[in-house]
Amino acid sequence: MQESASFWLGLGRSLKKIAQDATGSVWMAEMIHTLAAVVAILSIILLSALVLVYLERKVCAWMQMRLGPNRLGPFGIFQTIADILKLMTKEDIQPTLVSPIMWALAPILLFMAAMTTYAVIPFDAGVIFADLNIGIFFFLAVGSQASLPLLMAGWSSNNKYAMIGGMRTVAQMISYEIPLVFSILGVVMITGSMKMSDIVKAQEGLWFIVTQPVAFVIYIIAATAETNRIPFDLVEAESELVAGPFTEYSGMRWAYFFLAEYAFMVGASCVAATLFLGGWNGPWLPGWIWFFLKVSAMIFLFMWFRWTFPRIRVDQLMSFGWKVLLPLSIANVVLTGIGLWLFFPLN
Amino acid sequence: MTVKLTHEGVTASGSELYCLNMGPQHPSTHGVLRVVLELDGETVVRAIPVLGYLHRGIEKLAESRTYPQFIPFTDRLDYVSSMCNNLAYCQTVEKLMTVEVPERAEYIRVIMAELNRIASHMLFIGATALDLGGMTGMMYTFRDRERILDLFNLASGSRLTYSYVRIGGVMNDISPEFVNLLRAFLADLPGMLQEYDDLINGNEIFQARLRDVSIVPASRLVSLGVTGPVLRAAGIAYDLRRKKPYGIYDRFQFDIPAGTVGDNWERYLMRVLEISESAKIIAQALEGLPEGPVMAKIPKVIKPPVGEVYHANESPRGELGFHIVSDGSTKPYRLHIRRPTFYNLGSIDALCRGVKIADVAAVLAVLDPCMGEADA
Amino acid sequence: MNLEMIAAGSLETKPEALLNEMRQLRDNPVFGFDRLIDLTAVDRGETFELVYRLNSLLHDRDLLVRAKVSLEQPTIASVSEIWESALFGEREVHDMFGIVFEGHPELEPLLAPEEGFGFFPLRKSYTLPGRSGQTDGGNGR
């Protein structure tokens, strides 16, 4: 059991105290505290993207019996820095025939959606930016915004490959959102609340992966589809569509898309860790380290999928999502309801 | 090029047709092939292959090269299976000159040709996995193919374009080290195939992408002039090594895998099975390898008699034939190459009608085209 | 055209009779040549000699059919409606020799660029420029 004296909470409180003493107004201190929290979350996203770019290449290389980046720095750890520098110094090319506003807005909107979902992720007891009582619902609602910027990118690029990619995006993401929501519904039913901290507290005895194994599997499959990772990456299928909706983006604009993709993947891993793997629960170590380990395990799982499986075809994807996952997830909800009624009758 | 759409206006479902160009530069690995697709949504209505991006005028160049000088050109036709090309050409010239090749050279030729078939099929498995999204599969097959390339390097000095098979025999003898390495490779081969089975063939997604896709009746393929594993997948077990044995192929026991349905999966599976058959042939050839010279006694200046000859081999892609018209001089009067990929690519329209865009990449992959050969 | 000529392995036809004879060769079950393996041409100086290589899967037999067309009027009927492999084969011969195949649905350049080479490479009248075209031996043995 964790007391609410997490290291990060303590840091936040001292910051507030210092700000209050310095400025003399409670309101100002709150502002500074919130700003610091926003910076913290942004830095988590960016840092994790930084590390993941490098890690993905190393994990990929390890699975393919190669070495991966090993030139820049010891074990190639400065590779991401070189990549970032390259992307930042690239020429900003805007093709003439794109719709300028929509085309420029798409990566920004995607990144915004990815960033905002981090507001409800509990990194430790009390270390959550906004402990809304519709926590997980907020995550799903904002996360589902991802389909629109991709469609915008595909349409505004005035390019057939991009358009096909955009169309595929809408089909794929909408198809897999429903099983995603239903798989989470089982967890919410058992907890009785959508608040993220309540869900984690409910797992102090037993993780939900034990009581909801089917939901966990459905969640992983649907999350892979939502984040456009292989085996569901036909939106940007290289060998067919060059790069799908991202074809006309280069340099920093493409980097935004890339960052947003990684942010979504990490976000999905955080939600999996929170909902099914017990969140920040765990003996001896501080909660946020447990959280970090669980999220890392989930990220490794996603990477493992990417470098093992081939890509599924769009009609097979739709048929799988609607004819297999959806009935399974609904069955899971029904069975959870029956189980709850049997073991915890209302009195 | 402007493509005239199959029908003007809208289709039965109310949508418009549009053209998508899978251009000569494309992340799919198969060289400079361009396919213009006419699409109704995601379904292909017509597929038009555009060749010629790698045309190098090899047939014309042959007319100003002596017969031995042309051997390196044959390497670069189907650069993935150089030994088979060399073999087909040299056997054609030997047929014209009625040269008798020594026994040891014949056995070495068979070993090299079958080893090259295995290498080409391994590349095919990797490239197909890559085109379907499973990049790891490519790394595994390329790693194993490196062992074959090392063997070729030991024997001929090159990794990809060997010019090893010469008119009248082979370039030089193989060393005992080569034989030992080859035996070690053959011993490891079943393990490699098992690995591909676990990672690639046995994967459900991979099979779902290939099964029951692009089924074309065998009679259509025959009319299109398709040869090789694609034809065998449709049920016609025609293999030149069995029907018209060249060299000493009639001395070896091996099966000809043939399919029943003729879908993409069977076209893929044919080549996987052929790897095992080639390994059998190599093992038998190693058993029977006699001592002796590796080059026949032929004149220094090769001047075939006046005449015309055609000879065909079974290359990993199909029937590879050389048609040589000789006027009695040191250079061919006319040299024509019957290239399997050229005719196989003519079947793209038949294979791609009614499939999805994603399947076009799969069809191109299982056709196993090599553009160096298609364009000559 | 009878079985003895077929058994000899090669026969020569007139360009006017080509289409009929080819159709018989495929449709008559006694002949049964269902495959056109290869189609090429040879520049013989005053004429172009077209060489059709047929194969019968049924009877396991090959046949070579030759037809000569003149240099000034190099046209001949297309056999693409009999064997689909001729669709590509005839386009290649057209690019390289300039022979026109009447009845071919799409006689566009195949190996040549879209506008054609501008010349017909495999004709003997065309010599390759530079060292590639040397026919005096170089230092070949």
Image (cartoon, grey):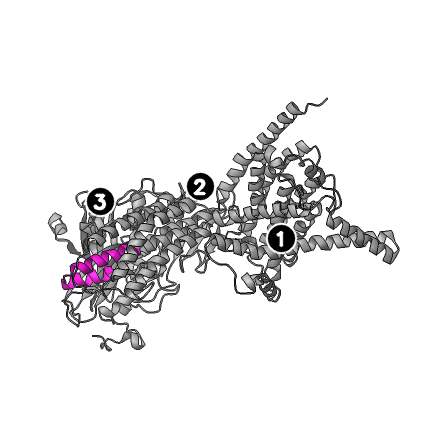
Q: What secondary structure is marked by label 2?
A: helix
Q: Residue at x 34, y 63 (%)?
A: B159
Identify residue for label 3: C27
The magenta region covers B87-116
Q: Residue under circle 1?
A: A260
Q: Position of residue A15 (x, y in %)?
A: 80, 54
Above or below for B259 versus B118: above
Identify the amino acid type marked 1.
Ala
Identify which residue, B49 or C83, lies in the foreground: B49
Dot 2 surroundings within 10 Å: few (below 14), some, or many (20 or more)? few
- Chain to which mark 2 belongs: B
Measure how far apart labels 1 and 3 are at the Cα level. 64 Å
Nearer to us: label 3 or label 2: 2
Residue for badge 2: B204
The quarter of the displayed image where residue C107 is located: bottom left
Taking the image as shown, residue B103 lies to the left or right of residue A275, namely left
The subunit carrying tag 3 is C
Q: Amino acid at mark 3?
A: Asp
Which residue is situated farthest in the top direction here? A347
Q: Residues within 10 Å of mark 3 (few under 14, many from 20)?
A: some
**Magenta stretch, overall SS:** helix
Q: Position of residue C34 (x, y in %)?
A: 24, 47
